[in-house]
Image: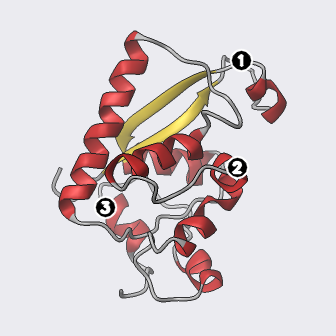
């Protein structure tokens, strides 16, 4: 949408007042949901309101591969709206679902394992597999692509990218 970008977040759907727990995530306590919105809505909420530590990495993929991944994710979101599924901390988490989308366009590129189930390891795994479009060492990209809390103004997407290193 011009200078606005679409973001998709895969999440455990919590009810009002409910706090996420990995243990509860194993016990079918949450539904799986995909949230689709502008970067300002999705990322701005996490960095500005919830004060989460968020990174936005450039990916090493062709425009066609990115388009196919986007369509695959939106199709999955639509399917979940009709046929809900439970979130599972190990088998159907935010990061394990993203791995499925990556493998849908590049079969077997990322193997399932502990690091695909736990989000804290996913960016290092993506870097090791060459999915992040940067030649910087991991520790440097981890800091370089961290998003600072930003205003929700109309130039949000440009603002969150302003300090990213040239590729």
Badge 3: residue crowd in 10 Å (few <14, some 14–19, many ≥20): few
Asked if residue 4 can be seen in this view, the reply is no
- Report the disc number at residue 28: 1
Residue found at the far top of this picture: 82
Where residue 151 appears, x then y in whole percent? 46, 57
Of tags 2 and 3, the one toward the viewer is 2
Q: Nearer the viewer, residue 67 or 12?
A: 67
Where residue 72 appears, x then y in whole percent? 31, 38
70 in relation to 161, above or below = above
79 in relation to 3, above or below = above
- Report the disc number at residue 118: 2
Give the CA separation, mark 2 to mark 1. 17 Å
Query: Disc 3, disc 1: CB below 8 Å?
Result: no
Where residue 97 appears, x then y in whole percent? 51, 40
Badge 2: residue crowd in 10 Å (few <14, some 14–19, many ≥20): some
Q: Label 3's element?
A: loop
Instruction: Identify residue for label 3.
Output: 155
Seen at 70% across and 57% down, the residue is: 120
8 in relation to 87, above or below = below
Q: Label 1's element?
A: loop
């Amino acid at each position: 949408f011009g200078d606005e970008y679409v973001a998709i977040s895969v999440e455990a759907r919590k009810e009002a007042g409910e706090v996420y727990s990995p243990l509860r995530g194993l016990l079918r306590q949450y539904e799986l949901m995909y949230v689709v919105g502008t970067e300002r809505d999705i990322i701005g909420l996490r960095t500005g309101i919830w004060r989460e530590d968020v990174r936005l990495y450039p990916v090493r993929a062709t425009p066609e591969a990115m388009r196919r991944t986007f369509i695959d994710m939106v199709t999955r979101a639509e399917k979940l709206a009709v046929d809900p599924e439970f979130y599972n901390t190990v088998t159907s988490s935010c990061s394990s679902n993203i791995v499925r989308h990556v493998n849908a366009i590049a079969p077997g590129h990322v193997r399932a394992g502990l690091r695909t189930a736990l989000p804290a390891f996913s960016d290092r795994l993506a870097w090791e597999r060459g999915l992040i479009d940067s030649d910087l060492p991991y520790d440097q990209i981890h800091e370089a692509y961290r998003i600072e809390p930003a205003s929700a103004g109309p130039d949000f997407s440009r603002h969150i990218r302003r300090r990213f290193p040239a590729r």
